[in-house]
Every structure is written in structure tokens, then in C-alpha cells.
Image (cartoon, rainbow, N blue to C red):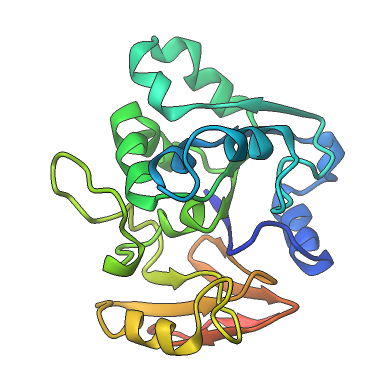
Amino acid sequence: MKLLLTSGGVTNASIRDALVELLGRPIDECTALCIPTAQYGHPMVGPGVRAWQFISGNSQNPMVDLGWKSVGVLELTALPSIDEEHWVPLVRETDVLLVAGGDVLYLCHWMRESGMADLLPSLSETVWVGLSAGSMVMTPVVGDDFIQWRPPTGDETTLGLVDFSICPHLAADGMPGNSMAEAEQWAAGIPNAAYALDDQTAITVVDGEVRFVSEGRWTQLRTLSSDPHQR
């Protein structure tokens, strides 16, 4: 897949331009599915108004409201109860998946349970736009600081489609978000490369090439085998 891993959504022109580049054509010519699942597992987000805000494009994190040709909803918790023929073709035909933040292990659990995780490797032209947990789910591990819900299996790994971990919502004073001191403490328990991103920063990953897109601040806390470059 083509990945756009954000901390706060498509929050500035540089991130939006990166998204259009990944899509290969204007946003208003592309179809989208939004995935709110992660929200239900987080105690500070949960079901209710915030899920509606994300789906309806009324949240403070620009994703659904960017002017797509069409937007649908893909709820991962529902997929195990319906035949794959009812949803897999829809996913394959969709240009972009918009994945909400919330609880990352809850999202990962339902990606595996629904079959979405198994489908991802075949979606070579699809763009995945993650918001916070929707980005972190693509990493190998998230660390205890970001775990509010644990799956019945006890498996705390995430999908590992990239080889680095992300601390989102970097903020100068940590309010709201995570301070640099908190990010550094988090990184001390991460076994692989790690980055802290503020909400004006995103990471694109295409065919293994990693690029940072930022009108804000990001920090490398651990080193990759080959350093990504900022654009």
C-alpha cells in the first residue's frame, strides 16, 4: 500500500499535496472509505459523538471532509458477520482508506479478525491515510504508554508494515499531546527505530521509501538503517 501516516490528519497544505501525489489525481476524483473502528476501543473517545464527527467530516482532524468524490463507511467490527463478497470488492475498488485514531490495539485486533490485515498486501494502489492510532497500527510495536485495551489473545504487536514506531501529538508543553520528555521516555522502551511527530507532520511510505512532510516539528528518537529525508 501507499501510506500517509499522520498525527493529526491532513492539517496543512504540504500534507494535502503529499496526499494528492500518492493518489495520482485530484481528491475530488477519488473515492474513499472511512474506518472509525479504533475510536470505540479508547476510553476517552469511545462510541457516540466523536465517531459521528469523524464519519460526517465534522471532527477537528481533516480527513473525511477534504472533498472526495464519494465517502463510505467501513466498520471492521461488522465484517466478520458478513460474507467477504459483500465488502472485499468495495475495498479493492476504493482509492483511499481514511483510518481514525483511538485505541491502536483495538484497531489492530479487528483488522486481523475481519480479514482486512490479510487483504492489505494485495492493495498495491490503495492509499492508507492514518490518523494517530490509524498510523501507529502500521508499526511493529506501540509501547505501553499507548495501550488502553488489550486483545483476548494477549498479543500486543501491531501489523509491522513499516519498521519504525510513532509517538504522535508531540507538543511543546505536552498539553494537549505528548511532551518531548514523554516521547523520549516512551522511546526508551521501543526496540526499533522511533519518531515523535506533531500534528502538522506526516510520514509517507511508498515501496519502502520513507519521507517526512512537515510544517511543524518531528524528532528522530532512534535511527533507521538509512535515514529518511525531509521534504
Residue 95 shows in the view:
no
Q: Is residue 124 left or right of residue 214?
A: left
Which residue is at 72% across, 53% downward?
A: 60
- x, y (%) of residue 99? 55, 44
Tell me if residue 55 comes above or below residue 229 in the rendering.
Answer: above
Q: Nearer the viewer, residue 169 or 194?
A: 169
Q: Is residue 219 left or right of residue 60?
A: left
Q: Is residue 170 left or right of residue 189?
A: right
Q: Quadrant of residue 223?
A: bottom left
The total number of labels drawn is 0
Q: Nearer the viewer, residue 64 or 25?
A: 64
Residue 129 shows in the view:
yes
Which residue is at 33% across, 19% downward?
A: 80
Quarter of the C terminus within the rendering: bottom right
Q: Is residue 102 left or right of residue 9?
A: left
Which residue is at 72% across, 57% downward?
A: 10
Q: Quadrant of residue 91?
A: top right
Which residue is at 47% across, 40% downward?
A: 46
- x, y (%) of residue 90? 57, 21
Outermost residue toward the left in this view: 153
Tell me if residue 18 comes above or below residue 215 in the rendering.
Answer: above
- x, y (%) of residue 95? 67, 36
Q: Quadrant of residue 165?
A: bottom left
- x, y (%) of residue 196? 50, 79
